[in-house]
Image (tube, helix red, strand yellow):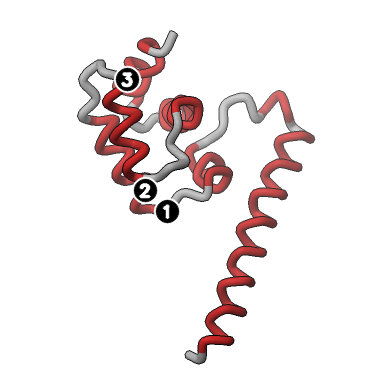
Amino acid sequence: MENNEYKELLAEIEKLKFHNRSLLTLVALLNDDKMQEPTIHETVVTYDLSKKDLKELTKLIQKYDGNNFALEQKALKINPIFNRNNIISIVKSLVVSSLFKEKGLEILESYK
Protein backbone atom coordinates (compact mmCIF):
# COMPACT_ATOMS: atom_id res chain seq x y z
CA MET A 1 0.00 0.00 0.00
CA GLU A 2 1.37 3.37 -0.93
CA ASN A 3 2.15 5.87 1.82
CA ASN A 4 -0.60 8.24 0.65
CA GLU A 5 -3.22 5.47 0.65
CA TYR A 6 -2.13 4.49 4.13
CA LYS A 7 -2.54 8.07 5.39
CA GLU A 8 -5.98 8.31 3.78
CA LEU A 9 -7.02 5.03 5.40
CA LEU A 10 -5.84 6.24 8.81
CA ALA A 11 -7.78 9.49 8.34
CA GLU A 12 -10.94 7.51 7.55
CA ILE A 13 -10.44 5.35 10.65
CA GLU A 14 -10.09 8.48 12.79
CA LYS A 15 -13.34 9.84 11.32
CA LEU A 16 -15.13 6.62 12.23
CA LYS A 17 -13.76 6.75 15.77
CA PHE A 18 -14.94 10.35 16.10
CA HIS A 19 -18.41 9.51 14.81
CA ASN A 20 -18.69 6.52 17.17
CA ARG A 21 -17.85 8.73 20.15
CA SER A 22 -20.15 11.50 18.91
CA LEU A 23 -23.03 9.09 18.40
CA LEU A 24 -22.51 7.56 21.83
CA THR A 25 -22.45 11.04 23.39
CA LEU A 26 -25.69 11.97 21.59
CA VAL A 27 -27.39 8.76 22.69
CA ALA A 28 -26.24 9.42 26.25
CA LEU A 29 -27.67 12.95 26.17
CA LEU A 30 -31.00 11.73 24.84
CA ASN A 31 -31.24 8.85 27.31
CA ASP A 32 -29.48 10.27 30.32
CA ASP A 33 -31.45 8.18 32.81
CA LYS A 34 -30.48 4.96 31.02
CA MET A 35 -26.82 5.88 30.59
CA GLN A 36 -25.96 6.14 34.27
CA GLU A 37 -24.55 2.63 34.12
CA PRO A 38 -22.64 2.23 30.85
CA THR A 39 -21.78 -1.18 29.51
CA ILE A 40 -18.19 -2.16 28.89
CA HIS A 41 -18.80 -1.82 25.13
CA GLU A 42 -19.92 1.79 25.55
CA THR A 43 -16.92 2.48 27.74
CA VAL A 44 -14.50 0.92 25.26
CA VAL A 45 -15.89 3.15 22.50
CA THR A 46 -15.83 6.24 24.71
CA TYR A 47 -12.21 5.76 25.77
CA ASP A 48 -11.12 4.30 22.41
CA LEU A 49 -9.56 1.27 24.08
CA SER A 50 -7.93 -1.49 22.11
CA LYS A 51 -8.63 -5.11 22.90
CA LYS A 52 -5.05 -5.41 24.17
CA ASP A 53 -5.42 -2.44 26.55
CA LEU A 54 -8.66 -3.82 27.94
CA LYS A 55 -7.17 -7.30 28.40
CA GLU A 56 -4.15 -5.93 30.24
CA LEU A 57 -6.33 -3.75 32.48
CA THR A 58 -8.60 -6.67 33.33
CA LYS A 59 -5.51 -8.70 34.31
CA LEU A 60 -4.56 -5.89 36.70
CA ILE A 61 -8.07 -5.88 38.12
CA GLN A 62 -7.98 -9.65 38.65
CA LYS A 63 -4.66 -9.32 40.50
CA TYR A 64 -5.79 -6.29 42.56
CA ASP A 65 -4.28 -6.46 46.04
CA GLY A 66 -5.87 -3.41 47.67
CA ASN A 67 -3.18 -0.94 46.61
CA ASN A 68 -4.90 1.75 44.49
CA PHE A 69 -1.67 3.64 43.83
CA ALA A 70 0.02 0.53 42.41
CA LEU A 71 -3.06 -0.23 40.29
CA GLU A 72 -3.04 3.31 38.87
CA GLN A 73 0.70 3.30 38.15
CA LYS A 74 0.59 -0.07 36.40
CA ALA A 75 -2.49 0.98 34.42
CA LEU A 76 -0.78 4.17 33.24
CA LYS A 77 2.03 2.04 31.80
CA ILE A 78 -0.57 0.19 29.70
CA ASN A 79 -2.23 3.34 28.36
CA PRO A 80 -1.97 6.98 29.49
CA ILE A 81 -5.78 7.22 29.35
CA PHE A 82 -5.94 5.07 32.51
CA ASN A 83 -5.96 7.82 35.10
CA ARG A 84 -7.79 7.43 38.41
CA ASN A 85 -11.19 8.68 37.22
CA ASN A 86 -11.11 6.65 34.02
CA ILE A 87 -10.14 3.50 35.91
CA ILE A 88 -13.11 3.99 38.22
CA SER A 89 -15.44 4.46 35.23
CA ILE A 90 -14.11 1.39 33.48
CA VAL A 91 -14.38 -0.72 36.64
CA LYS A 92 -18.00 0.46 37.04
CA SER A 93 -18.66 -0.67 33.48
CA LEU A 94 -17.13 -4.06 34.18
CA VAL A 95 -19.37 -4.43 37.24
CA VAL A 96 -22.48 -3.42 35.25
CA SER A 97 -21.49 -5.89 32.55
CA SER A 98 -21.13 -8.59 35.25
CA LEU A 99 -17.45 -9.05 34.44
CA PHE A 100 -15.14 -9.27 37.44
CA LYS A 101 -18.06 -8.08 39.55
CA GLU A 102 -16.64 -9.12 42.91
CA LYS A 103 -13.17 -7.67 42.26
CA GLY A 104 -14.69 -4.57 40.66
CA LEU A 105 -16.88 -3.88 43.68
CA GLU A 106 -13.85 -4.34 45.93
CA ILE A 107 -11.91 -1.74 43.92
CA LEU A 108 -14.83 0.69 43.86
CA GLU A 109 -15.27 0.33 47.61
CA SER A 110 -11.58 1.14 48.16
CA TYR A 111 -11.98 4.41 46.25
CA LYS A 112 -14.79 5.67 48.52
Image location of residue 55, percent across then percent down = 31, 46
- Element class at badge 2: helix
Image location of residue 91, percent across then percent down = 42, 28
Give me the disc on residue 53. Answer: 2
Tell me whether the residue at label 1 lies in contact with that at label 3, contact meaning CB atoms closer than 8 angstroms.
no
Front residue (pair 74, 99) = 74
Give me the disc on residue 69. Answer: none
- Element class at badge 3: helix
- Element class at badge 1: loop
Pointer 2 or 3: first along the chain: 2
Q: Say which amino acid is labelled 2.
A: Asp
Mark 1 or mark 3, whichever is nearer to me: 3
Q: Is residue 9 above or below residue 5?
A: above
Q: Quadrant of residue 59?
A: top left
Pointer 1 or 3: first along the chain: 1
Tell me whether the residue at label 2 lies in contact with that at label 1, contact meaning CB atoms closer than 8 angstroms.
yes
Q: Say which amino acid is labelled 1.
A: Ser
Residue to which mark 1 is pinned: 50
Callout 1: few (<14), some (14-19), or many (20+) C-alpha neighbours within 10 Å? few
Residue to which mark 3 is pinned: 68
Image location of residue 10, percent across then percent down = 56, 72
Residue drawn at (76%, 42%) of the image: 26
Residue drawn at (36%, 48%) of the image: 53
Image location of residue 17, percent across then percent down = 61, 58
Real-space Cα separation, disc 1 to disc 3, in angstroms:
23 Å
Q: Say which amino acid is labelled 3.
A: Asn
